[in-house]
Image: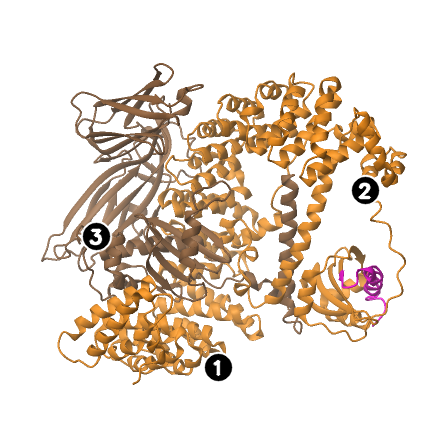
Chain colours: A orange, B brown
Amino acid sequence: MAPPAQSQRSPSPSQPSGKGEVSDLKMQLRQLAGSRAPGTDDSKRDLFKKVISYMTVGIDVSSVFSEMVMCSATSDIVLKKMCYLYVGNYAKYNPDLALLTINFLQRDCKDEDPMIRGLALRSLCSLRVPNLVEYLVGPLGAGLKDGNSYVRMVAAVGVLKLYHISASTCLDADFPALLKHLMLNDPDAQVVANCLSALQEIWGLEASTSEEAVREREALISKPIIYFLLNRIKEFSEWAQCTILELVSKYAPPDTNEIFDIMNLLEDRLQHANGAVVLATIKLFLQLTLSMTDVHQQVYERIKAPLLTLVSSGSPEQSYAVLSHLHLLVMRAPMLFASDYKHFYCQYNEPFYVKKLKLEMLTAVANESNTYEIVTELCEYAANVDIPIARESIRAVGKIALQQYDVNAIVDRLLQFLEMEKDYVTAETLVLVKDLLRKYPQWSHDCIAVIGNISSNNVQEPKAKAALIWMLGEYAQDMQDAPYALEGLIEDWEDETSPEVRLHLLTAVMKCFFRRPPETQKALGAALAAGLADMHQDVHDRALFYYRLLQHSVSVANSVVNPVKQAVSVFADTQSSEIKDRIFDEFNSLSVLYQKPSFMFTDKEHQGPYAFSEELGHLSIGAEPAAAAAAATDVDHIQANDGDLLLTTTEKEESRAYDNNYSLSQLSAQQPTSTIDDIFGLGIGLSVAPPPPPPSLQLNAKPVLDPATFQQKWRQLPVAVSQEGSISPQGVAALTSSLEPLLRHMQAHHINCIASGGKSPNFKFFFFAQKASDSSNFLVECIINSSTCKAQIKIKADDQTASQPFFTLFQSALSNFGIIAS
Amino acid sequence: MRFILDGRHERYRRFRSLWRGFARHCNRLSSPNTRDLNQGRYFLGNMISQFFVLSQRGDNIVFRDYRGDVQKGSAEIFFRKVKFWKEDGETEAPPVFNVDGVNYFHVKVVGLLFVATTRANVSPSLVLELLQRIARVTKDYLGILNEDSIRKNFVLVYELLDEVIDFGYVQTTSTEVLKSSVFNEPIMVDSAHMPPLGPAALFMQGNKRMPGTAVTKSVVANEPGDGTIQMKSYLSGNPEIRLALNEDLNIGRGGRSVYDYGGSSGSGAVILDDCNFHESVHLDSFDVDRTLTLVPPDGEFPVMNYRMTQEYKPPFRINTLIEEAGSLKAEVILKIRAEFPQNITANTVVVQMPLPTYTSRVSFELEPGAVGQMTDFKEPNKKLEWGLKKIVGGSEHTLRAKLTFSHESHGNITKEAGPVSMTFTIPMYNCSRLQVKYLQIAKKSKTYNPYRWVRYVTQANSYVARI
């Protein structure tokens, strides 16, 4: 047999170093291939080992493929195994060579020794070469019926491998049906488990295109199969038990007796040393009892002890996984773990990731009865030499304070932190004290006394510096030195690298000015001058804004900068309850560790074949942050609104020059009632002037747009119109049964649907239309809420000017739906 | 401002979820079956894509690709990510993280990184447990687990990996089952000793780990602690074993909080808060007479993990004294007193204490006639280390350390040093009172009398005295 052409060339340009050795190996292998002398196998073993060691370190040894195959004619099982390993590694990238192996693998599949049959079948299925699938069907079919359980075990997974190489071949050969039969009849537990895994994956992936697959997938969680598996659960390996428990957690027992039967049967799984089994059982128990509040509570009580044991018995990595789940449970039932808080004390040699979770647990379980002890413990960590943990601990103390337990004592502790005179402790504490004061203004007196003593020179971190400056401004009247401290900071304006700090500095000095004008006047002038000259756009804009505000009216400026503030009662939760519920549904999965539902981190391939929409999802995200950023800036400005006079004459002249350009500001100045709106009116008023009445719009009756173009355009175009529309209740009623009528209705208005979906009460549609005159496109995203009869409409258009008339058209078409038969 | 930003993320997340639902629909407009909108969440299985072992330097020692759906360069991506981890102020990578849709799991065993990758949303406990188990099985086969032994035996390791996992699904991790399908003979590295399989041997070890923290001021601590009954079995023929524990053993506190028991500790019963068992353990008669029956697999495994809260006397008392001696000098005096009986000895005691960061030099002074003690100043992390080979019960040891500072300390030195931590092992000191009353081999072979060996060890990994 002629060696493959590839071996003539350099085996791999990236690995020239191994080239000499590889050709040596090739020579030696060739010599041994035909030899039948005793001891040949031993020499072969040595050579094979060398080949595989090269393979492991990344040297390309694919050039010896044919020699390896020639040498594989042996009864030595160790040799065979090495050969299979080699073949499996290279076949995928050398399909021509893979063909060479088919023969001997097929022969081995009929070997007397079941071990060799199994191994050969496994290798055969692992070649991952699409044009060889025809050779797999026969051996797989025989393997599934083999008398030896090892071969059947391998064959069951082999079917799954075949499915991934060629789904149609696998389905055409009716392998899933064979697997199902095997699953319900095989005496070997691992064969059953492999059949189950394979079927779950095959039907799960098929379900997107085939109704039959959906039915088959549902059949897996039917009562007979669930009971069949549960009754044998102890025969399965711990790993297979996890698979079965996960499957059972999808099963919805029709009555409560069944629920109790299942839970009683699986109760002892909670005492398993394998954390995965315990967590899978817990998930099942929680899911089963979701609608039974009392029992659900009992489940929490029951699972507490096993979980705590798992935390302390495994490796730190395992503790981490279990603690993440505990954290999720604690968030749902904080009282439950309140008395076990000592389990969450950190041990000094634990890795950071475990400590951090434990600190979060301590924060979560803190209540009236244990806060004192928890905070005492946390304070010990704060004094620790481990700086990241010290920081986290201080944050944890702050969070507990914000939960309103024992605030008095905590404020004292926080203030003690400031006396420790460690930079990072001071920095973290300052940020916390600021948040605390926003929630509990009544503590300002105590805090300010201490804060006043802190020299801003000792605070370097931007966040901490910003917090300190905020307090200097906010409590200027209580802090003797406030104007002078600010003055000092303004002198160092040039050296201040963080724009955040400079922004805060501007605002603080404004606030301070209104409280102590004579002392601050000079500093304010300097700050505004520095701000106006600042390179950072936001800083510049804010300085300019203050300047104009002061110029406009001092009293308005004061009410803007120093409004009556209400204490913040609850800081916004970072996660919606919807997201939290989603994570809870995905208990015992990565979602819990990442604290996000799976759709946020699994890629499209593992979500099913929906590339198009996934892409689109990305695009629209681009638009969202922009809008939100705009909103954020608005808020920024609102907070920043301060005002005052004290402008020098030159400045006044300067500003007069601007006045002409901003006549609107004069207009707004005459309506001093709603200050903030008016001030905004000054800048933005011009841009929101209504567009000229558009010409009437004619749409193309037969628009054409393929999804890819739609997708691309959706990504590129800005949102032209984003408004709420309405739909008639009759229309909504029609929607809940089928989406089709609406699509036809819109089509009658020359608006075509490119995609739709959703579940009551939220439906989502993507429409497109084309202008008759110049075939420019309109793209629409429309979310209809059937309970409120409202529609959120977002329009993007090639021709921006036409978007408003298009919206009108769209809205009228939508609102007609259900009233006028289309 | 922070909160507003977070709010924005939330909106975006919800948005994505809508999209996904919608997406599903667009591929199947012909049959609007809303049920399918959830199918992305449908669990496909706990499968991994790749498994690999990396050395501390990031070299691939073993690399096995099971499913081919994760790129080949994953080991490099992983190692770079772990090595230069910097997220949320953390400097150490968590055991699980996601890079570009690939989930990386890793556990550290004897300095090696055991890694698995997958794209699926699997059970993290399962994969992390699996990695630990692979390490244990490998150790069972190789006798000793380190870079050298794996490199020498990589063909055997590959063979194992092929049987442990097929197409990403775990098949078995039992040394017992694997025996029938693994054929390579291990190559011994010099330091490895395979226990002889001929005259069978059975080792039992009860490990009690000391509770997390101990405060020097209180003599009696009341803290949760945990322990393990470890078994190492090399019995041929796999006989059944009966293991009896204290008859007065109680598990759980009947719904009461573990902290609010008052005088119950005086009753003499051993109360465990909770425990779990290895899968080979049968508990049929456990409720009746506190015996466990099991057919032990070959090798080492934990028979039982337990957790208990009890009053106990800390085995050591640590006293620390820091005295300033001038502006650039200070003296630290560490005193350790062993509070356990004289017939017991603690081994491999290591005391550590972080010193102020501006410490430049430390000179040590041990008590006269000290043997088996060593002292060190770990310059890079400014830690004082004091090792004692053994400490006899009732004895007391003192270390004096003179510190020299590079600049003047401002403030309280005691706040910049400490806490003192201690690790130690005390063989035959069972502070939990949980005992193995007897150990019985059910079907005793006539040809040999197996060697049985039971010992108790108290270990502390995190014993801290705060100054």
Q: Are the residues flagged by discs 3 and 2 in contact, CB closer than 8 Å?
A: no
Q: Tell me, yes or no, whether the highlighted magenta stretch contains residue A814.
A: yes
Q: Main secondary structure of the magenta part?
A: helix
Per the rendered image, the range of residues in magenta is A796-822
Q: Position of residue A342 (x, y in %)?
A: 43, 34
Distance between the Cα atoms at labels 3 and 2?
81 Å
The crowding category of the residue bearing disc 3, from other C-alpha atoms within 10 Å (few below 14, some 14 to 19, many at least 20), is: many
Asked if residue A278 shows in the view, the reply is: no
Distance between the Cα atoms at labels 1 and 3?
49 Å
Q: Which mark is residue B250?
A: none
Q: Amino acid at mark 2?
A: Gly
Q: Amino acid at mark 3?
A: Ser
From the image, tell me which residue sits under label 2. Answer: A683
Badge 1: chain ID: A
Q: Position of residue B450 (x, y in %)?
A: 13, 52
From the image, tell me which residue sits under label 1. Answer: A172
Q: Tell me, yes or no, whether the highlighted magenta stretch contains residue A76.
A: no
Left or right of A415? Residue A680 is right
From the image, tell me which residue sits under label 3. Answer: B233
